[in-house]
Image (tube, rainbow, N blue to C red):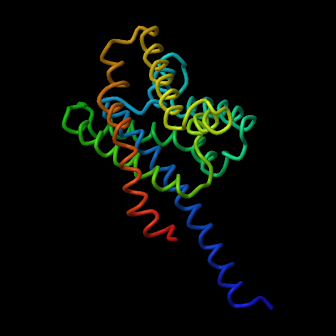
């Protein structure tokens, strides 16, 4: 018979795995909802979403399906580069985030059809906080990262280009540049470009890191991933 200590350890490991899975799934789902708030706010979005939004205006399919297609291509690349980065979080991100973002954005547009500045500012604040909180849930869970996050990690850990934070700046810059370029060549008005790259983009660049750290230390690790 197994000793009581081994049984306790086995029970603890199973419960910890369940907790990590729950944090991963909830975190990724909140990420999709947050992107929906960002898109409705139209004060600028995170760099990858800016690229996706630019692509969305030139590719004649709905945003959710386009998100799945682009991330599926990135997933194939990541598998070849470093399959250890692929996990449950990667798969959930692939199939849920785009459709959740589209659903929330359309829902908010129906609730606030006028697009007045008040609700948009509130949605921007909610989007920033929720996106940071979602990262504080699924990243410590260590169940795989999004395909976009994986690219910068490969650049830093396998190709040794620069430190991760600088490689992430490179990928962010490329995404924003591509998003703006796609908007420009599709003939979109400057108002549409500012909806993608604006104050919201700057806020995510400078404040998400500290907010993720605060939520991780004071919520995720304090209540769910102790020790």
- Image location of residue 183, percent across then percent down: 43, 15
Nearest to the observer: residue 192 or residue 197: 197
- Image location of residue 95, percent across then percent down: 60, 42
| Residue at the right extreme of this rendering | 1
Nearest to the observer: residue 227 or residue 97: 227
- Image location of residue 104, percent across then percent down: 40, 41
54 vs 157, left or right, is: left
186 vs 87, left or right, is: left
Nearest to the observer: residue 99 or residue 41: 41
Residue depicted at x 38% and y 33%? 39
204 vs 66, left or right, is: left
Quarter of the rendering occupied by the N terminus? bottom right
Residue depicted at x 30% and y 34%? 41
Residue depicted at x 56% and y 58%? 141
Residue depicted at x 46% and y 31%? 49
Q: Is residue 156 above or below residue 130?
A: above
């Amino acid at each position: 018979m197994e000793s009581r200590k081994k049984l306790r350890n086995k029970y603890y490991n199973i419960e910890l795995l369940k907790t990590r899975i729950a944090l991963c799934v909830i975190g990724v789902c909140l990420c999709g909802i947050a992107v929906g708030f960002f898109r409705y706010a139209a004060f600028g979005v995170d760099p990858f979403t800016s690229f996706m939004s630019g692509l969305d205006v030139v590719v004649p399919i709905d945003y959710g399906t386009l998100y799945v297609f682009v991330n599926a291509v990135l997933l194939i690349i990541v598998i070849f580069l470093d399959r250890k980065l692929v996990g449950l979080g990667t798969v959930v991100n692939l199939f849920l985030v785009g459709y959740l973002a589209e659903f929330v954005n359309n829902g908010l547009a129906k609730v606030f059809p006028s697009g007045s500045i008040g609700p948009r500012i509130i949605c921007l604040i909610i989007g920033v906080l929720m996106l940071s909180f979602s990262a504080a849930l699924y990243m410590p869970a260590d169940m795989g990262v999004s395909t976009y996050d994986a690219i910068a990690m490969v650049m830093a850990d396998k190709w040794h280009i620069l430190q991760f934070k600088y490689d992430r700046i490179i990928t962010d810059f490329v995404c924003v540049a591509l998003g703006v370029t796609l908007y420009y060549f599709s003939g979109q008005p400057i108002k549409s470009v500012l909806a993608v790259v604006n104050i919201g983009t700057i806020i995510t660049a400078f404040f998400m890191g500290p907010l993720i750290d605060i939520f991780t230390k004071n919520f995720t690790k304090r209540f769910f991933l102790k020790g």
